[in-house]
Image (cartoon, rainbow, N blue to C red):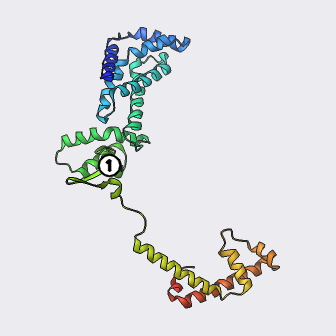
Amino acid sequence: MKNFSADRRMIKIAMAAPYLERQEEQQLAQAWKENHDQEARNKIAMSHMRLVISMASKFRNFGLPMSDLVQEGHLGLLEAAARFEPSREVRFSTYATWWIRASMQDYVLRNWSIVRGGTSSAQKALFFNLRRLRAKLAQGDKHLTAQAVHEEIATALGVSLADVQTMDARLSSNDTSLQAPISSGDSDSGERLDMLACSAPLPDEQVSEMIDQERRSIWLRHALSKLNEREMKIIRARRLCEDSATLEELGVDLGISKERVRQIETRALEKLKIALVAQAPVLASMPH
């Protein structure tokens, strides 16, 4: 009740503020620009609060408090007053409209949903124009399908059809907590979180993978047993360690050239392949 009274009082004060004549507006803007006269800037801003309130009413459909919209618009108005160039001979209301709208749009995008949206100019245009264009198209041709409406909007705003469909779905529903209960008949049947599909493998897939992993480990141990001591050392250092050794490092360690290390490694890999294929012929068709 207190907020409602404060809103009405603010609107009443704004509506009672006198209009500025063009010459007076120019003089006040000049005083702010040249002398940083805060009172002159505030007087310009207050005389245009009607514009802020009028524009705030256009954003009420997003379910945000009118008082918050007006406050954001007032910040945009003050920014416009600070940046206004009286030498351009443009009325302040024309210049301030963009700043007021931009400030309110940013506020709506930040607070309308916990999921951030409208990060690009095209997405912002889609967010604020989708409902209006959809209503206009439906009024012009009531037999248009939802797909046709989305295609028309995508063409008009220069965005993809998928972006229009995604945004329309977001605007058609509110944020819902994953902890919100799901009711079934007279009793609760859990939370929405329980209905999300799990990305983890199914139990039978996990068991199958575990068995396959054990089988591959047995095959590899058996194949490695076919290598001699030097081949085993090179394969372990080059293929089975997280930080593999270079051919040059192994050459220094073994007292041979790096080319000889490469030849031994190639021969060892071929022996491993033969041993593995002998145990599981299906491996012959698999890439190395």
29 up-or-down from 191: above or below: above
Picture quadrant of residue 227: bottom right
Name the residue that disc number 1 marks.
180
Residue at 50 percent across and 86 percent down: it is 282
Left-right relation of 200 to 58:
right
Left-right relation of 251 to 139:
right
Residue at 56 percent across and 84 percent down: it is 218
Q: Is the residue marked by circle 1 packed among few (<14), some (14-19), or many (20+) residues within 10 Å? A: few
Residue at the limit of the structure toward the bottom, as seen here: 278
Residue at 68 percent across and 79 percent down: it is 235
Percent coordinates x, y for residue 167 in the rendering: 34, 46
Q: Which amino acid does label 1 sit on?
A: Ala
37 up-or-down from 130: above or below: above
Left-right relation of 161 to 253:
left
56 up-or-down from 134: above or below: above
Give the position of the C terminus as an image quadrant: bottom right
SS at badge 1: loop
User: Which residue occupies the foreground of this view, 78 or 20?
Assistant: 78
Residue at the limit of the structure toward the right, as seen here: 255
User: Which residue occupies the foreground of this view, 34 or 267?
Assistant: 267
Residue 189 in view here: yes
How many numbered discs?
Answer: 1
Give the position of the N terminus as an image quadrant: top left
183 up-or-down from 234: above or below: above
Percent coordinates x, y for residue 173 in the rendering: 29, 45
